[in-house]
């Protein structure tokens, strides 16, 4: 143990602890800006600087280790002066027109400037211009970048894609796409993890709210909205609603209050996905020799983009089942248009997703199988949902709860856990058990696949058939798993991969809570919703049963292939 004093308080911490962490153990808060625990501890912003007795210069507390007998002052005159000056320097290179910024009210730089009572910047403003390919779902606004390096490190260390790098030198130093590429030429998965870890508005999603509102106000359009499983676990965060208030039914009421025509649930098509993907897996198992193994889940578009760019030779190992988002879109403009007895071209299909990659997925040229334009016209993130509700002056706290519309608003507990890592696997195993044994298992029989570790394995036996399963979340973990498979060090039958750590609960489109990872808390909410749902098996979803009876006939039918499956090579 190491003994030191911080602000005259005696502190004892293990060797190797940083001053920042040591101070926190005795309740002393040091402001930080570029710091991201275990990912970015580079002391670049100098906001966490502190004075150490005997040292001439101030030190960054986030990456300076404690020493025996050290005497630290976190808020001496000198430290305070330097900290304020550093923030003022950063502001002088940042376009701080906060009122017109997506992160207004949720920006760490804005918060620190406010906390430090900075009300003027005594230096000339000099920031990089905003230049970007506007149509890409992910936007970098160089005028807001503070060179903290968090995005560089997240994409490199967690997602293993190295999309960002430092460019230029001197006062023109900035962060941009690495190797002088355009973002459209890089292998960005559009996972959005760099967005959720950016402390300012330098990275954000393309805002598509206006497209939705234009459709809402177009009398010829029938606006049909689907809401993804993981959105319900997080939408209240961006509005300051407590979890007890931010229920699924209040979310349905709030979205309806925007003026859309129907509020449906992606849980419906997550159940449909299980029917198609589960049966596809069993079909591949029956003709084992005709396929390469393992079969990979295909519902996460960040993961699909990753596989296609990093391991294109494995593309045919993806399940051909579309993601629930895309299945829903195709159903809305075919089966549901038929139910409503309207021309499918009148349907405007909107998804609300915890995800930025869904914006890229719905725009893929092949995602138009219903023959009425793109099957999903616009995909909004959870953050956009929150901003749209605010802009439409809707106060969810004042709204009574309402049901989803039917029939596409019915979902089971198996569907809602899609939003947590391991959930797709668990839902698929529940239904595979039923198909093979003609009876349901205990709904919690496969909870061995749950958890927050980045890579997990499970050996399961169903009706005497061994299934070797693996689950990974985070693209760096996906890469590790694939490399092991390629090297022959591991063999699996079925692998679930989600691009974001913790799955969609930790998605790149979720509300931003800087410095706090909430994927596990949100995931626990989804497991709770599963437990409370009277239906916990995808094959028991009454609307899915009706859709097969009235329209699709059976899983993997000709019509199902046409509308619910895709060719990932196309
Ligand atoms: Fe997901 Fe999915 S689970 S990908 O994380 O398969 O976005 O929530 O909607 O499509 O269902 C996201 C979540 C979501 C799809 C489903
Ligand atoms: Fe990297 Fe994901 Fe950001 Fe793309 S979206 S740059 S893959 S972190």
Image (cartoon, grey):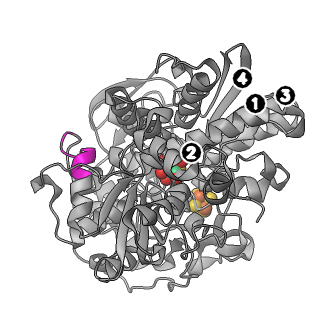
Q: Magenta span covers which residues?
A: 244-251
Residue 24's place in the image compared with 191, above or below, is above
Q: Is residue 246 magenta?
A: yes
Which quadrant of the figure has residue 254? bottom left
Identify which residue is drawn at 56% across, 61% down.
Answer: 357
The reply to whether the C-beta atoms of the residues labelled 4 and 3 are less than 8 Å apart is no
3 vs 2, front mark: 2
Identify which residue is drawn at 34% across, 67% down.
Answer: 103
Mark 2 residue crowding within 10 angstroms, few (<14) / some (14–19) / many (20+): many
Q: Which mark is residue 489?
A: 3
The reply to whether the C-beta atoms of the residues labelled 3 and 1 are less than 8 Å apart is no
Mark positioned earlier in the residue sequence (1 or 4): 4
Q: Does the closest atom of ligand 1 sit within 8 Å of the Cβ of label 2? A: yes
Q: Which mark is residue 467?
A: 4
Query: Which residue is nearer to you in this view: 240 or 31?
Result: 240
2 vs 1, front mark: 2
Query: Which residue is nearer to you in this view: 28 or 66?
Result: 28
Q: CA distance from mark 4 to mark 3?
A: 17 Å
Mark 4 residue crowding within 10 angstroms, few (<14) / some (14–19) / many (20+): some
Q: What count of labels does the image hold?
A: 4
The reply to whether the C-beta atoms of the residues labelled 3 and 2 are less than 8 Å apart is no
Image spot of residue 155 (x, y percent): 62, 55
Query: In the image as oriented, which residue stretches furthest toward the left?
Result: 398
Q: CA distance from mark 3 to mark 1?
A: 14 Å
């Amino acid at each position: 143990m190491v003994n030191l004093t911080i602000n005259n308080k005696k502190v004892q911490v293990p060797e190797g602890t940083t001053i920042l962490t040591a101070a926190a153990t005795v309740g002393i808060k040091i402001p930080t800006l570029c710091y991201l625990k275990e990912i970015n501890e580079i002391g670049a912003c100098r906001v966490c600087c502190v004075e150490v007795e005997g040292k001439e210069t101030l030190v960054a507390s986030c990456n300076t280790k404690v020493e025996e007998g050290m005497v630290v002052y976190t808020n001496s005159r000198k430290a305070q002066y330097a900290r304020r000056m550093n923030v003022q320097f950063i502001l002088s290179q940042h376009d701080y027109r906060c009122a017109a910024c997506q992160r207004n009210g949720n920006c760490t730089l804005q918060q620190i400037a406010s906390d430090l009572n900075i009300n003027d910047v005594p230096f000339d403003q000099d920031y990089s211009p905003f230049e970007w390919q506007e149509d890409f779902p992910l936007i970098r606004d160089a005028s807001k970048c503070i060179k903290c390096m968090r995005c560089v490190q997240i994409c490199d260390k967690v997602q293993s894609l190295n999309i960002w790098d430092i460019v230029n030198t001197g006062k023109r130093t900035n962060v941009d796409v690495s190797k002088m590429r355009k973002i459209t030429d890089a292998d960005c998965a559009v996972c959005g993890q760099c967005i959720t870890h950016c402390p300012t508005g330098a990275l954000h999603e393309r805002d598509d709210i206006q497209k939705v509102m234009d459709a809402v106000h177009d009398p010829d359009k029938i606006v049909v909205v689907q809401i993804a499983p993981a959105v319900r676990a997080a939408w209240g965060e961006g509005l300051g609603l407590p979890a007890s208030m931010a229920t699924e039914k209040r979310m349905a009421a709030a979205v309806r209050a925007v003026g859309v025509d129907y509020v449906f649930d992606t849980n419906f098509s997550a159940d449909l996905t299980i029917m198609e993907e589960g049966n596809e897996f069993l079909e591949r198992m029956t003709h084992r020799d005709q396929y390469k193994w393992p079969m990979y889940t295909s519902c996460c578009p960040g993961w699909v983009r990753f596989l296609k760019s990093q391991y294109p030779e494995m593309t045919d190992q993806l399940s051909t089942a579309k993601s629930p988002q895309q299945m829903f879109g195709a159903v809305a403009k075919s089966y549901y248009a038929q139910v409503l007895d309207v021309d499918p071209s009148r349907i405007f299909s909107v998804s609300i997703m915890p995800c930025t990659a869904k914006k890229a997925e719905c725009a893929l040229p092949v995602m138009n199988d219903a023959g009425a334009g793109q099957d999903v016209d616009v995909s909004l993130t959870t953050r956009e949902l929150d901003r749209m509700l605010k802009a439409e002056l809707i106060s969810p706290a004042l709204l009574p709860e309402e049901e989803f519309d039917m029939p596409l608003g019915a979902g089971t507990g198996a569907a809602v856990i899609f939003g947590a890592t391991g959930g797709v696997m668990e839902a698929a195993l529940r239904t595979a058990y039923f198909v093979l044994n003609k009876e349901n298992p205990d709904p919690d029989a496969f909870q061995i696949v749950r958890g927050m570790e980045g890579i997990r394995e499970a050996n399961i036996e169903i009706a005497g058939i061994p299934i070797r399963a693996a689950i990974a979340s985070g693209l760096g973990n996906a890469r590790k798993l694939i490399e092991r498979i390629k090297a022959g060090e591991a063999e699996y039958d079925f692998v679930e991969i989600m691009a974001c750590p913790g799955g969609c609960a930790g998605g790149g489109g979720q509300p931003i809570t800087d410095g706090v990872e909430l994927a596990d808390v949100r995931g626990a909410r989804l497991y709770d919703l599963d437990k409370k749902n009277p239906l916990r098996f995808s094959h028991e979803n009454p609307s899915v049963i009706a859709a097969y009876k009235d329209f699709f006939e059976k899983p993997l039918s000709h019509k199902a292939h046409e509308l619910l499956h895709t060719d990932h090579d196309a």
